[in-house]
């Protein structure tokens, strides 16, 4: 199986920044990585019923809501539209999904090679994130385990709060370099370091 490579691997500008030190104090830690298996499950009017066998096979009770990530074992489930969910899964769970999915009523689309994840972490992460998207990133309105779909400079992204001080941004692969460079530029005044995932 071909190795999935970072879209930043050949970007000299992004690579050079790994060696720059803007301040002695580092305000943010930035990392980027492949999402693993990212599967979109879609359907039509009876999607709720049609998706039940597939979701049950991986330990989920239903579609969930539009802002809270459902978790089951190694599966994260994002309800992104009335008839669409996004599943971030491991290989074993994918086998269960594939075996239990009705491809006519709930077709699967593998988005693993079309998305990338940029993670931003730091004590002031809400300040940095609010420079990227016009959302309220405070813990009261965007708690851990929640996600929102938004746009960053007209790039459609999914933002998931995975910890009090950490967000993951799922971004279309072809926009990864542009978004990475923007985040680095905004993080520069507070300092940042690149973390390996």
Image: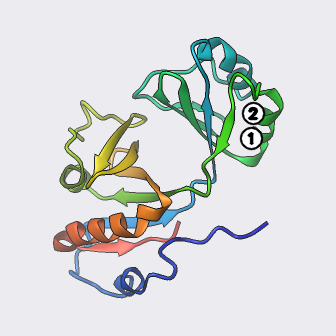
Which residue is nearer to you in this view: 174 or 138? 174
Residue 147: x and y in percent read 39, 37
Label 2: which secondary element: helix
Dot 1 crowding, Cα within 10 Å, few <14, some 14–19, many 20+? some
Classify residue 27 by image quadrant: bottom left
Residue 26: x and y in percent read 26, 72
Image marks 2 and 1: residues in contact by CB distance under 8 Å: yes
- Residue with the mark numbered 1: 94
Model colouring: rainbow
Separation of marks 2 and 1 at Cα, in angstroms: 5 Å
Which residue is nearer to you in this view: 188 or 177? 177
In the rendered structure, the answer to whether residue 172 lies left or right of residue 72 reads left
> In the figure, 181 relative to 118: above or below?
below
> In the figure, 152 relative to 63: above or below?
below
In the rendered structure, the answer to whether residue 27 lies left or right of residue 29 reads left
**Who's the residue at 60% across and 72% down the image?**
5
Dot 2 crowding, Cα within 10 Å, few <14, some 14–19, many 20+? many
**Who's the residue at 35% across and 74% down the image?**
193
**Who's the residue at 49% across and 61% down the image?**
173
Residue 171: x and y in percent read 44, 54
> In the figure, 191 relative to 120: above or below?
below
In the rendered structure, the answer to whether residue 109 lies left or right of residue 141 reads right
Furthest residue in direction right, as rendered: 99
In the rendered structure, the answer to whether residue 96 lies left or right of residue 22 reads right
**Who's the residue at 46% across and 55% down the image?**
172
Label 1: which secondary element: helix
Residue 71: x and y in percent read 57, 32
Which residue is nearer to you in this view: 46 or 127? 46
Q: Which mark is residue 97?
A: 2
Classify residue 137 by image quadrant: top left
């Amino acid at each position: 199986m071909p190795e999935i490579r970072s879209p930043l691997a050949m970007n000299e500008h992004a690579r050079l920044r790994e060696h720059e030190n803007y301040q002695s104090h580092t305000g943010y830690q930035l990392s980027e990585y492949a999402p693993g298996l990212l599967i979109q499950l879609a359907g039509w009017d009876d999607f709720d019923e049609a998706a039940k066998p597939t979701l049950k096979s991986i330990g989920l009770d239903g579609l969930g809501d539009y802002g809270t990530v459902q978790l089951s074992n190694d599966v994260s489930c994002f309800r992104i539209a009335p008839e669409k969910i996004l599943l971030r899964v491991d290989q074993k769970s994918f086998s269960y999904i594939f075996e239990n999915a009705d491809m006519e009523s709930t077709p699967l689309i593998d988005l693993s090679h079309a998305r990338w994840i940029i993670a931003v972490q730091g004590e002031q992460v809400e300040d940095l994130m609010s420079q990227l998207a016009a959302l309220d990133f405070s813990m009261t309105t965007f708690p851990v385990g929640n996600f929102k779909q938004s746009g960053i400079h007209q790039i459609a992204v999914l933002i998931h709060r995975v910890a009090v001080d950490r967000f993951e941004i799922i971004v279309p692969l072809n926009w990864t370099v542009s978004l990475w460079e923007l985040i680095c530029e905004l993080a520069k005044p507070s300092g940042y370091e690149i973390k390996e995932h």
